[in-house]
Amino acid sequence: AQSVTQLGSHVSVSEGALVLLRCNYSSSVPPYLFWYVQYPNQGLQLLLKYTTGATLVKGINGFEAEFKKSETSFHLTKPSAHMSDAAEYFCAVSLEYGNKLVFGAGTILRVKS
Amino acid sequence: EPEVTQTPSHQVTQMGQEVILRCVPISNHLYFYWYRQILGQKVEFLVSFYNNEISEKSEIFDDQFSVERPDGSNFTLKIRSTKLEDSAMYFCASRRDTLPQETQYFGPGTRLLVL
């Protein structure tokens, strides 16, 4: 069965600093990988996804993530944090023949001025 | 931009009561889902629905839960006799077609509190 681990339930960065949110997955088959963001009182919004092809994926709001099969990781990065990036971020996987998304526990990102 | 909507945004109910959570998926989408997130825990899959039947359900989705697409636009989750442990945020999602790499679009959620 697949699972997703997000290291760090809370991450705090200064405005302008690098954002790094970690995600590792466990899957018996190559997964499809997603990052979702949830702003307060809103639903889950897709940031980016990896399906096939280029392992470095660019998403909205300047975020990107790199699929590293050897490390079973899909870490999310942004070179320079903005106050508006403060939210909860969820990593998720979906299998080739499956339907559902399996989520990590989420990481709350705080951006300090 | 089309979006998934959910009503109500908050619901408070007494233990043992029935609740119906409503969702309007994106209009040309074919797959529909319910997920829930108990406070402080992961977002968990409950059920997926396609072609007017359940395509997959989790262990959580027992006989107390049911889903329905009563018309061409609504997708509902019913909990027949709520328990305290059903208190959670419930998210509806929809997807355009069958490919697993297709994006699931989520609604804003219904926060259910069972007293």
Image (tube, rainbow, N blue to C red):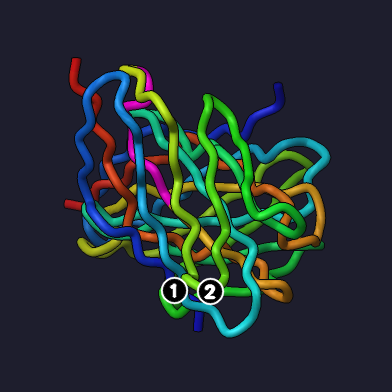
Image point 68% across, 62% down: which residue? B49
Residue B56 inside the magenta-drawn segment: no
Image quadrant for the N terminus of chain B? Answer: top right
The relative height of residue A83 versus residue B37 in the rendered view (above or below) is above
Q: Which residue is mark 2?
A: A70
Query: Which percent across, then down, holds residue A87?
Result: 33, 32
For label 1, the SS is strand
Figure disc tally:
2
Which chain does the numbered disc 1 sit on? A
For label 2, the SS is helix
Which chain does the numbered disc 2 sit on? A
Same chain for the residues under marks 2 and 1 in the image: yes
Image point 44% across, 60% down: which residue? A103
| Image quadrant in which you'd find residue B79 | bottom left
Along the line of sight, which residue is nearer the eye, A71 or B15? A71
Image point 76% across, 57% down: which residue? A53
**Depth-wise, is mark 2 or mark 1 nearer the camera?**
2
Question: What kind of residue is marked 1?
Answer: Ser
Query: Which percent across, then down, holds residue A15?
Result: 27, 19
User: How many other residues sit within 10 Å of disc 2, few (<14), some (14-19) or many (≥20)?
Assistant: few
Image point 54% across, 39% down: which residue? A64
Res. B25 visible in picture: yes
Question: What kind of residue is marked 2?
Answer: Ser
Along the line of sight, which residue is nearer the eye, A91 or A39? A91
Residue B71 lies left or right of residue B78; in this view the side is right
Q: Which label number is shown at residue A3?
A: 1
The relative height of residue B4 versus residue B21 in the rendered view (above or below) is above
Query: Which of the two discs, 2 and 1, labels the residue nearer the N terminus?
Result: 1
Residue B72 lies left or right of residue A22; in this view the side is right
Along the line of sight, which residue is nearer the eye, A49 or A105? A49
Range of the magenta residues? A84-90
Find the distance from the CA under tag 2 to the CA under tag 1: 16 Å
